[in-house]
Image (tube, grey):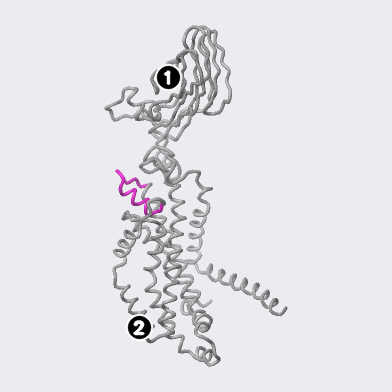
Amino acid sequence: MNRTLSTQSKIPYRLIRLKKFFVSLLSTKMAAAGLILLLIFVGLAVGAPLLTPFHPKEEIVSAPLDPPSWVTFYAGTAGYSLNSQFSGLAYNTVGSGMKVTSGNLTSNSVDLAISSTSGGKIQLVKTLNYPYKGESKGFLGNSIVIVKDRTAPINATDYVTKLYGDPRAENFTFWPTKSLDLVQTYSPIGSLDENNVAQIIGLGGTSLNAAQVIFNVPGTYRFVLELTLPKGSFTAHLSIREFELFVHGNTFGWMGTDDSGYDIWTQFVYGARLSLLVGITATIIGIGLGLLVGLMAGYLGKLVDEVLMRFTDMMLVIPGLPLLIVLVAVLGQSLTNIIFVLGFLGWMGFARLVRSQVLSIRERPFIEAAKASGAGTGYIVVRHIFSNIVGLTYVNLALSVPAAIVGEAALSFLGLGSLTETTWGRMLAEARGGVSLPWWWIIPPGLGIAALSLSFILLGFGFDAIFNPRLRRRR
């Protein structure tokens, strides 16, 4: 009963101590700024799936090398455009003697039961109101016709109609007329994009792509799939699938796109998650090893101290970055290997620092009293020595995280990072390997590395001010 009450009484006491610790920490301006910065990045890392609907490297969201959409606030709207999509699937008939029944109508598909006595046309139409003064940079679409049964061949074609302010209109053929004479699936060769269509509309050999020619002025556009029925008695059942056209603007999102059309904002927020994971995990490994080696060398002394310190000296004189490069190249380019390599090569300086503190503490009278009372080595190290250097551990834990973050970024920048994960270092490496270096691609990961590292450095200074009495300011 008394033991239970004692345990319960410790809980409020620990909460009070924790509260006092955070009050002391936040009273230091540098520590408060570091904690705010760190919480921002933790929010990005945890909330990444909520902050962006895309995947860093699986979804092309717009045209390559689009600047952020907010450039229009200082550069004006002339010459800029955003992503647009054709919508509102409907169909109409041209000619008499036709009966069309539709089913399973969605935004991109419909089933048609057709009967005709004198031919005619069926047009499936989607519409786009394009309000932008700038030309688009690309488009991506498709249209699939599945012929289930028919009594005669059908001719099909795809085109986009550009409507101007007067009755004039201009047609651009996307899918040349094709005879659907078999019971099977028909679709364009490859996808509908600005490069394939450029050849069809006669832009081959020029520097223009089809998107720049077609979607370049404000107006109404219609995406049409036209089915021409044969004359005479005719019946057919058709399924139209993936009838869609997505127009890529020349600006996108908060941070634009890279040279493949992937969203840089998505890469940035997921990169924050991996940078925190690498920095904290590698630092915990390094601090843990350094603490173990320093405690053993300082307290046990003699041969143990000599062996451990000479091994530490040997590790200190080996150049760090070349050794990192060799180990990662040998072990493999995975994030797990990078974390362990950074951790196992980041303990030496902290081990020497812990040893020097332990050499001083072990000579104090309370250690001699603990030995005289029969306390074992493990008890003395954990309860008496470690408790006196725990502040030093917290400070070095915070100050060592930036080194691990920068180490991972350096390896990724040199092409030795993870090949499957998107990190800030990999973003910088890909930007360096691109045709050009747009500012919206290189600044976010660079600032992210600097700001996240700064947050831990500021927290480290705050911890040092709390745990080191010499740095405390008199109030």
Residue in the image at 62% along x and 72% along y: 16
Is label 2 in a helix, a strand or a loop? helix
Residue in the image at 37% along x and 61% along y: 406
Q: Foreground: 336 or 402?
A: 336
Q: On the picture, is 216 further left or further right than 36?
A: left
**Residue type highlighted by circle 2:** Glu
Name the residue carrying label 2. Answer: 306
Image quarter (top left, top right, bottom left or bottom right) of the N terminus: bottom right
**Residue type highlighted by circle 1:** Thr
* Relative height, residue 56 to residue 87 (above, below): below
Name the residue carrying label 1. Answer: 157
* Relative height, residue 182 to residue 351 (above, below): above
Q: On the picture, is 63 further left or further right than 15?
A: left
Residue in the image at 39% along x and 60% along y: 337
Let me know if residue 432 is in the magenta part: yes
Quarter occupied by residue 203: top left
Q: Which residues are magenta?
A: 422-439
Q: Foreground: 292 or 202?
A: 292
* Relative height, residue 133 to residue 323 (above, below): above
Q: Foreground: 308 or 93?
A: 308
Q: Position of residue 473 (x, y in %)?
A: 49, 76
Q: CA distance from mark 1 to mark 2?
A: 83 Å
Q: Return the disc, 1 or 2, that comes first in the chain's sequence.
A: 1
Label annotation for residue 423: none
Q: How crowded is the residue under tag 2: few (<14 C-alpha within 10 Å), some, or many (20+)?
A: few
Q: Main secondary structure of the magenta part?
A: helix
Quarter occupied by residue 211: top left
Is label 1 in a helix, a strand or a loop? strand
Q: Position of residue 146 (x, y in %)?
A: 48, 23
Query: Residue at the bottom extreme?
Result: 372
